[in-house]
Amino acid sequence: MATLLLELSMTRIFSVVFYYHFAFLAISIALFGLGAGGVFSYVVAARPGSMFGKLGFLSAVNAVVPLISLIFILTRGTELSNTTLAAVYFLSALPFFIAGAIVSLAISETIERVDKVYFFDLLGAAGGCLLLIPLLNTFGGPNTVIAAAILFATGSAVWYNLAGERQMRAGAVALALALVVLVVANAKSPIIDVKYAKGQTLDNEVFVKWNSFSRIAVAKERESGQMQVVIDADASTGIANFDLENLTEGQRKDLTLQGPAFPYKMRPGAKTLIVGPGGGWDVSRALAMGSKDITGVEINPIIARTVMQERFLDFSRKLYQRPEVRIEVEDGRAFIRRSPEKYQVLQATLVDTWASTAAGAFALSENNLYTTDAFYDYLSHLTDDGVLAITRWGFEPPRESVRLLTLGRDALTKLGEKDFARHVMVVREGSTQGWGARDTVLISRKPFSEIDVEHAKLICAEAKLQVVYLPGSTNDTPFAKVLTLPDLKNYIAEYPFDISTVDDNRPFFFYTVQPRDLWGFLVNPEGKSADYKINKAVPLLFSLVGISIVATIVILALPPMVLGTRLPREKGVLRFLLYFLCIGVGYILIQVALIQKFVLFLGHPTYALTVIIFSMLVFSGLGSFLSQRLVGENDGKLVGALALVSLFVLILALSAAPVTSALVGWPIAAKMALTMLMIAPAAFFMGMPFPQGLARLENFHKPSVRWAWSLNAAASVLGSAGAIFLAIYLGLRETLLVGGLLYLGAVVVVRSSSRYLRST
């Protein structure tokens, strides 16, 4: 429970202090530490003393070590160098290293009942998953890490009680109570808190609140007095502060002549849906242009409720409580899919938070708002004169904004439209030097009329917006080519950036580095450029794969270095150790893909994280609990369990998308229950291979059990990085299938090793 709670809370800390890409690092760190600690447990076991006493001591130490790691992370006031990154990696791995030793010792002492012990291990982890959300929502990120330390101290008291050491038990209880006092004191007057983030000092924040997928701060700009809502100390949205009935001339220009106001100038008084309204600027624009029916869908309840409707209600002039405005707290795609209404303007302005959800920690950055499937949903919810308006950053040559057109073209094709060039308008505000330009793309449900085109020209002249593309344009720009070329395949392949379509199966809209340019991007990064920031996950992914490989080598080197053992040479042992490699990689590939596959269906990344991980842990635990009864020493039954994992994963890969799309309108409780039912069969049988494999290895060649721990941990470290790689370049469905195939690989290993296992 403590270990999973610590692992997931660290993803939030990493996203805030460093960048959202680094949230994935916490997963790699945890798996590395657990594997190395499993090997180290053999050193602890060899030392004299009571086993329960040793477990009590390790747990007490692990009630302090997370605080040391946390303080080190929170005091990094500059950008990360490679040396600092390595220090963060290995220091943050220490509590997981100790946790790995604790779990390994407990299991090794009870190997004859490993099925039961593994069940309670997974059940505790499921409890940690459930605790994460209320703790983050109530106490924030740093205090949730301290809460994990409290659980370690509590565990220490339990171990010392079993060891009969009363004084040590009292000390562990006192330590736990001291940590409880620290949480309460730190919640009231933060001492251990985020003071630095992304190389900057956070010194102008007037309000801070955490939840399971963000740290929201409101910062006051010193010169203007403007309030900015800042998400994970990076992305920001200003709180709109307009007296809409008495606008000054400057305010009227801000609301009606900027790029994101373009759709309202084209369709004044429109029935409007705004995805990600944030601080309310787009809502204010719609109101200023006469809209009387505005729906805003904001995924973050802290922004929608706490900031805009409670703490800063007066500053926003009660914007979200106006009768014309309705605010829904939900994922934008999920709301649109279940909505029966149609809109004249559907708008999303720079909707990307640069923040990692706990779920997103497993998949770097994905955004289901920018896929061909999303655009089909959007265009299907427009009236015949309706427009989809999306504002993204403008560059030369264009990346994001021209990629929007490839998505729109695909969605229009599915809707039976053919003359794509008549459906699109693109205008630009500002300069393309740095981050100055904003491209606003309008995609209409039906072709724009000549009157619309002339009207757009007048609007651009009045607002001093640059016309990038209008229907009938003859300019030779990437926008025109994407809309007019009959076959885009060759053009996209030769374009300097990746502007190909992305769908819900591979929703990586923001990664625009062409595969052919990966090496150059990795070895010659321009760290200050906008491209580098947007695509930073690409070099980071490769860096983490490299770190994971180093960590794996360390794990595999530990038994000979620490224990003086070498790879076993007995016949069949090496072959059977591959079994643990297969199930280790397979399990995490399946978990990563399932979390992402169900985000859209469940309506929120946090729901996906909680339901998927909780379901897999609980049903895998049940599988482990019953594995001795259902599988036992029968290799044929073990092969059957492995084959059933592959079968049920195949069924999930084929059925998840159509089933969830058809039932997206169900109530959230029903959708959670259905998700658990869909996952249960595969997860149940996924709980059997590990304990049964360990039991076989214990009987077959006892010294190799430590190698099984090492290989399984190493496999998880590599698998967590490999899952991201597969998802980006192949897709989530394919990642699921590869995970299922690895369980078939385990079948081959069992079959080929069975004669050696029987010979013992």
Image (tube, rainbow, N blue to C red):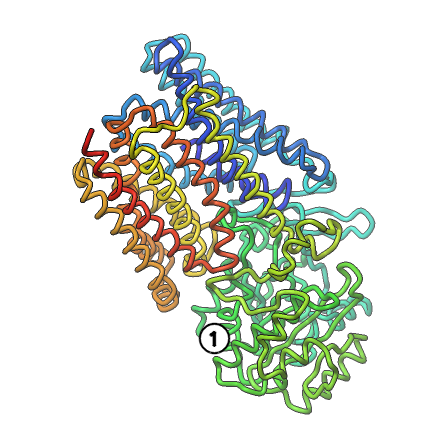
Amino acid on which disc 1 is placed: Glu
Helix, strand or loop at mark 1? loop
Q: From this view, report whether residue 529 is shown above or below residue 705.
A: below
Can you tell which quarter of the image residue 206 is in? top right
- Whether residue 713 appears in this view of the structure is yes
Q: Looking at the image, which residue is at 78% across and 59% down?
A: 434
Nearer to me, 550 or 322: 550
Task: Name the side, left or right, on which 180 lies relative to 662.
Answer: right
Label 1 Cα neighbours within 10 Å, binned few <14 / some 14-19 / many ≥20? few
Nearer to me, 236 or 679: 679
Q: From this view, report whether residue 608 is shown above or below residue 400.
A: above
Q: Quadrant of the N terminus?
A: top left
Can you tell which quarter of the image residue 105 is in? top left
Q: Looking at the image, which residue is at 83% across and 49% down?
A: 223
Q: Position of residue 263 (x, y in %)?
A: 66, 76
Residue position marked by numbered label 1 in the rendering: 341
Q: From this view, report whether residue 201 is shown above or below residue 37.
A: below
Nearer to me, 166 or 368: 368
